[in-house]
Amino acid sequence: MSNTPEELFAAEQKQSEIDHHVPTAGAMVNHIVSNFTVLDAKLHQVRWYVKGLSAPAIQTVYTKLIQENRDHYDEIGDLLLDENEKPASTTDEYSEYSMIGENGKNKYFTAEAMVGETVQDFVTQNLFVDRAIKLAEKENRPTLRNAMEKLRGDDNHEIRVLQSIVGNDAGEGLEDDDEDDED
């Protein structure tokens, strides 16, 4: 007996609710997929609105960041499917699961503040990546763990590049609201 699309989606939503309250590695990675979608809009916002003498260089960096972010979105979405998970695929889900905030006023920030905001977004993303690594290890999901470890390295590289644009060392002035979290 086949289920209707409505029944299948209702079952998916029910399981997602359970997984996000437990949480599971798959649910944590779904937060990351959702973060990618919001980050895409925020990266475009900087590329489109940055002003000043450094704008051309920042726009070049952000063009690269946008492509890398989109590549990660596709790779991690496919990985979730390979791992028998259901990646978020609607704007409602992205809004619900993303932990990266956005605001229209950011387009009026200075170039330095815009870049600083992006750095903090990568720091926020890494909180979820680190949790996903721990959960994947606990659940014995080595492929998921390895992908998250690679993403962590990529994010760390982007943080260093962005921090250098504003004259900071890689970890200088970063907010890590989760440093005492021991899952």
Image (cartoon, grey):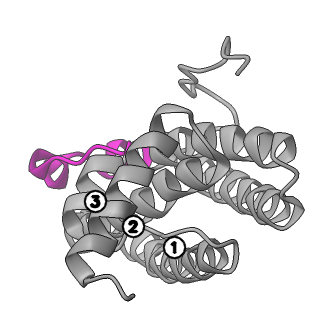
Please state which of residues 82 and 113 is positioned toward the viewer in this rendering.
Answer: 82
Dot 3 lies on which element? helix
What's the residue type where badge 3 is placed?
A: Glu
Location of residue 51 in the rendering, given as x and y in whole percent from the top left corner: 24, 63
Location of residue 34 in the rendering, given as x and y in whole percent from the top left corner: 40, 60
Disc 3 crowd, CA 10 A, few/some/many (<14, 14-19, 20+):
some
Disc 1 crowd, CA 10 A, few/some/many (<14, 14-19, 20+):
some
Q: Residue at x 53, y 19 (%)?
A: 177
- Which one is closest to the eye, mark 1 or mark 3? 3
Location of residue 42 in the rendering, given as x and y in whole percent from the top left corner: 30, 61
* Residue placed under numbered mark 1 in the picture: 69
Write down the quadrant of residue 141 in the picture: bottom right
Marks 1 and 3, Cα distance to the nearest angstrom?
Answer: 18 Å
* Disc nearer the start of the sequence (1/3): 1
What's the residue type where badge 2 is placed?
A: Ala
Q: Residue at x 28, y 43 (%)?
A: 101
* Residue placed under numbered mark 2 in the picture: 88
Please state which of residues 90 and 67 is positioned toward the viewer in this rendering.
Answer: 90
The answer to whether residue 9 is magenta is no
